[in-house]
Image: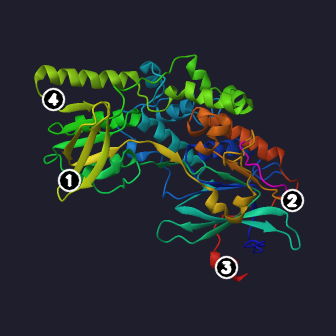
Amino acid sequence: MSQGLRTAETPVHDLVGVGFGPSNLALAVALAEHNGTVGEAGPDTVTAHFLERQPRFGWHRGMLIDDATMQVSFLKDLVTLRNPSSRFSFLAYLHSKGRLIDFVNHKNLFPLRVEFHDYFEWCAAQVDDQVSYGYEVVEVHPVTEPGSDEVTLLDVVARPTVPGGAPVVLRARNLVVATGLIPKLPPGVHRSERVWHNSDLLHRIDTVDPTAASRFVVVGAGQSAAEVTAFLHGRFPEAEVCSVFSRFGYSPADDSSFANRIFDPGAVDEFYGAPEETKQRLMAYHANTNYSVVDIDLIDDLYRRVYQEKVLGQQRLRLLNVCRAVGVDETDTGVRVTIESLATGERSVLESDVVVYSTGYRSDDSLPMLGELAARCRRDELGRLRVERDYRVRTTPEVRPGIYLQGGSTEHTHGITSSLLSNNAVRAGEILQSILGRRVQAPVEAAGAGRYSLSAAHSA
């Protein structure tokens, strides 16, 4: 077994975080609050560092449409459900920006998405000493003592993603993986200059000439698809926008009070302890709270547009329901999209400037970065990771460090909130308490800056 990339100067962090989206940001905030309570240099201080491949904090930047709103209450921010008096709350953010009274008068639980993103950035700026941007974790090596198979620490190897950066090795007692979701496309479809995933929308939209665009095709039936459809319809007033989906119409999201209890922190306990058959039933029962559904206000807005255009005799917004896109072929001037009716089997071809797939996301498979440690992670009979209630991967007994997961890879064990913001604050607190509870009482080593040369580590 590898002895790790040990150097005399390498400090040991209580935890190293992989990824710095909202999940690990919530954890960093919980750490900052904890250390502020126990003292920054005291024996109960938790030392941590996070590695993020993006050059700065960003959360779904490609979908920060100006008028798009959040689908969760502002009270489900990074901290409030864990610590309502926190200085990192959304209300504290509003106060700092001089908008608290304005927001109260707005009488709305759901902020603009661009505003909530700004809140995330505001929080991230306050804990930026804990994170290194522009670094992608590529390997995790077990560290053992000579003559022993017991894994005592983990060496986290990251490479720079921006010019001028040096490789880093961070040593950790615990690893918290929160690498987010990866855009999902149908088999055989690949992103290009004219074939986009909805996550590309705002990054690529300025490449389209508004005076020349004549048609867009949007594939998908969920919230993102509806938002992209509405956005393109408004942005390009001379172009036709065709929304293609297999349903008869957009399905409304169930955000009723009782259904929303599936997002409560207590629901995680009930889901985790339930038999597998019950878990599958709960996911099926409540899928319409989150998957392939649309806010009713947006549905009503799109219907109003379609009806208005029928009245005026100038139909630009076309909803191609009970259909699917079965072929996408790029040409010299655009994209040829083949549409098949699920009712009749009839096929038609649409010549489009751009096709946007709003076909969701999948969980990032983080196990390859674990290398030989991946084989020490327990799986169930379906091949899924076994994850403890505290979000720690169940490993073989000789692995002492905790490997924690945040995100969709725990949905099968912890339920529908795993990849959502609803339980973010509480989950971060639970992970921190787990790390504190399992902490090895040993002299705290200096945290340092967390940037170390790979070449120096190999030569030591």
Q: Earlier in the sequence, mark 3 or mark 1?
A: 1
The residue carrying mark 4 is 315
Of circles 3 and 1, which is in front? Answer: 1
Of circles 4 and 3, which is in front? Answer: 4
In the rendered image, residue 394 lying in the magenta stretch gets the answer: yes
Q: Earlier in the sequence, mark 1 or mark 4?
A: 4
In the shown orientation, is residue 66 left or right of residue 306?
Answer: right
- Check disc 3 and give the amino acid type: Ala
Q: Earlier in the sequence, mark 2 or mark 1?
A: 1
Of circles 4 and 2, which is in front? Answer: 4
**Residue 18, position in %: x, y?**
62, 55
Q: Nearer the viewer, residue 317 or 112?
A: 317
- Check disc 1 and give the amino acid type: Gly
CA gap between label 3 and label 1 equals: 50 Å
The residue carrying mark 3 is 456
CA gap between label 4 and label 3 equals: 65 Å
Residue 87 visible in the snapshot: no
SS for tag 2? loop
Residue lying at 70% horizontally and 49% vertically, measured from the top left: 404
Disc marking residue 334: 1
Q: Residue furthest left?
A: 313
The residue carrying mark 2 is 443
SS for tag 3? helix
SS for tag 1? loop
Q: Which residues are magenta?
A: 391-397
